[in-house]
Image (cartoon, rainbow, N blue to C red):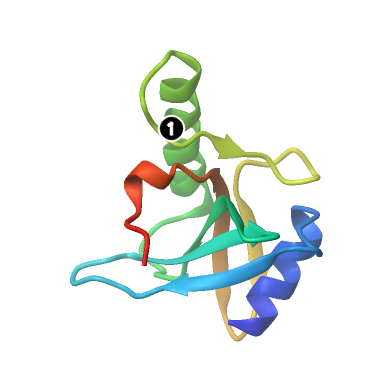
Amino acid sequence: MTKILEQAKKLYSLEDCNFTSVSGHGGGRNQIVIVSRDGEKLYVLRISSLGDRSESDYLAETEFVRYLAENGAPVSDVIPSDQNRLVECVEADGNYHIDVEEEYSVYYKSE
């Protein structure tokens, strides 16, 4: 996971942020990491490692979420990387697809 987070920091200019993993749930397809700075939750980093979907599948999903956000739906908008990509492919003992979304605290319970 460390290699993935290091790459995400560079791809999204998150070098000054903290990363906190969220425990998984049954049937979950992604690893979720909360990205915060100075104690404020900023983003959700989604890490997808299953090989049953292609990069274009992930891209279609994030484009749909972006469309919903731009048209007023109550969803967390996708944040493009510094390369203006909605999905990035990183390599760390296998290929992983990552994307970053705005953090909405209403979706997460405070601990």
Question: How far across and how far down the image is residue 75, in percent?
Answer: 39, 32
Residue bearing mark 1: 65
Dot 1: element = helix
Q: Which of the 4 image quarters holds residue 3?
A: bottom right
- Give the residue drawn at x 53%, y 72%: 20
Report the residue at 42% width, 39% height from top: 61
Quadrant in the rendering for residue 84: top right
State the residue in front, 69 or 56.
69
**In this picture, residue 3 sits left or right of residue 98:** right
**Dot 1 amino acid type:** Val
Quarter of the picture holding the C terminus: bottom left
Residue 56: % across, % down: 51, 45
In this view, 26 is above or below 61: below
Residue 22 spot, x, y in % from top left: 41, 70
72 to the left or right of 40 = left
Residue projecting furthest to the left: 26
| Residue located 36% across and 21% down the image | 73
Give coordinates of residue 58: x percent, y percent.
47, 48
Q: How many marks?
A: 1
Taking the image as shown, residue 102 lies to the left or right of residue 90, namely left
Identify which residue is drawn at 70% across, 60% down: 38
Q: Nearer the viewer, residue 109 or 8?
A: 109
Crowdedness of circle 1 by 10 Å Cα count: few (<14), some, many (20+)?
Answer: some
Tell me the quarter of the picture where residue 1 sits.
bottom right
